[in-house]
């Protein structure tokens, strides 16, 4: 039988093909969870399961799995609920909403399409996944933990990211509202606001801009995806059983 913070639990992670989602799969599997890695890029989700999850599956003996998922497509999300129930006979009681995209541009130059696609993935996608899987948990009378990945940009804004900052601020308010509604079912909902983390999204930032950003971080470095994943695992576990509706900065002091 596995031991660990989340031993025997089933966890769904969106955006699992890279960055924070992949790191979350690594840490949750290490801590004993069976992981469903969901990503729009199926090949990268498969790579996460094959190369980046602990070999030991959860104490229920179930296998990790990779699935293709466009979080902004309600039909695809509903289908995933059904296939998960068929495969595992139970809904995941840990849901990590890590799928997110950027389409940066100046406010005065941003296209409506670039605005909408970011809202659809980051905000609507988080809503659809949270709604569908919270419903499955309530129908199975299971307690659970939902962790939604926001961003420190959602609190302070950022040049060139009006669309992204707006979507991530929405994730915080939505998480707080969902926590109030789902508490009676013993389903906890929290948001994490990462700062500058060494993920594929940050690798598009020019070096000069990056150095300027790091000057604003008291710890003087980028965060590691694994550091965010450790917080995700804690919030997913019974160690955080009285934490809900919280928005936790993980920024190196930014």
Image (cartoon, rainbow, N blue to C red):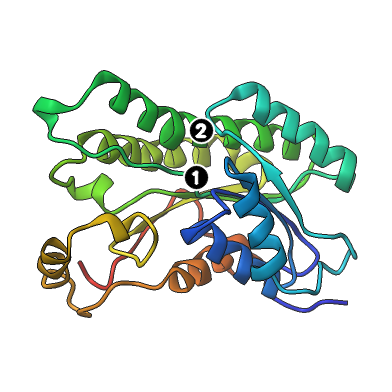
Q: Position of residue 127 (x, y in %)?
A: 51, 32
Q: Quadrant of residue 252?
A: bottom left
As helix, strand or loop, the secondary structure at mark 1 comes to: loop
Would you place residue 37 above or below residue 81 in this image? below
Q: Position of residue 108 (x, y in %)?
A: 9, 26
The numbered mark, 2 or 1, whose residue comes first in the sequence reads: 1
Frontmost residue, 150 versus 143: 150
Q: Which quarter of the rendering shows the C terminus?
A: bottom left
Q: Quadrant of residue 28?
A: bottom right
Q: Which quarter of the rendering shows the N terminus?
A: bottom right
How many numbered discs?
A: 2
Q: Which residue is mark 1?
A: 99
As helix, strand or loop, the secondary structure at mark 2 comes to: helix
Q: Position of residue 13 (x, y in %)?
A: 61, 51
Give the distance between the C-alpha atoms of the residues marked 2 and 1, in whole angstroms. 8 Å
Evaluate whether residue 210 shows in this view. Answer: yes
Q: Residue at x 19, y 27 (%)?
A: 110
Q: Which residue is mark 2?
A: 125
Would you place residue 205 above or below residue 104 in this image? below
Instruction: Assess whether mark 1 and mark 2 are in contact (beta carbons under 8 angstroms).
Output: yes
Q: Farthest front residue?
A: 43
Would you place residue 123 above or below residue 12 in this image? above
Please tell me the numbered disc located at residue 173: none
Evaluate whether residue 241 shows in this view. Answer: no
């Amino acid at each position: 039988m596995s031991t660990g913070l989340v031993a025997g639990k089933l966890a769904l992670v969106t955006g699992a093909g890279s960055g924070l989602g992949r790191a979350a799969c690594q840490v949750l599997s290490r801590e004993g969870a069976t992981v469903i890695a969901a990503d729009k890029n199926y090949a990268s989700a498969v790579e996460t399961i094959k190369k980046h999850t602990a070999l030991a599956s959860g104490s229920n003996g179930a296998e990790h799995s990779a699935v293709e998922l466009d979080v902004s497509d309600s039909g695809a999300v509903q289908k995933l609920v059904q296939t998960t129930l068929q495969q595992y006979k139970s809904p995941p009681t840990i849901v990590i909403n890590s799928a997110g995209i950027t389409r940066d541009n100046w406010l005065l130059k941003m296209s409506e399409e670039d605005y909408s696609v970011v809202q659809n993935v980051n905000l609507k996608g988080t809503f659809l996944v949270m709604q569908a899987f919270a419903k499955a948990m309530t129908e199975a009378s299971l307690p659970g933990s939902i962790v939604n990945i926001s961003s420190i940009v959602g609190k302070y804004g950022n040049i060139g990211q009006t669309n992204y900052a707006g979507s991530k601020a929405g994730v915080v308010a939505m998480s707080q509202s969902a926590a109030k509604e789902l508490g009676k079912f013993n389903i906890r909902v929290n948001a994490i606001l990462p700062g500058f983390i060494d993920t594929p999204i940050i690798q598009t930032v020019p070096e000069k801009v990056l150095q300027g950003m790091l000057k604003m971080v008291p710890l003087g470095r980028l965060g590691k995806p694994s550091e965010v994943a450790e917080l995700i695992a804690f919030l997913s576990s019974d160690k955080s059983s009285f934490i809900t509706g919280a928005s936790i900065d993980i920024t190196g002091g930014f």
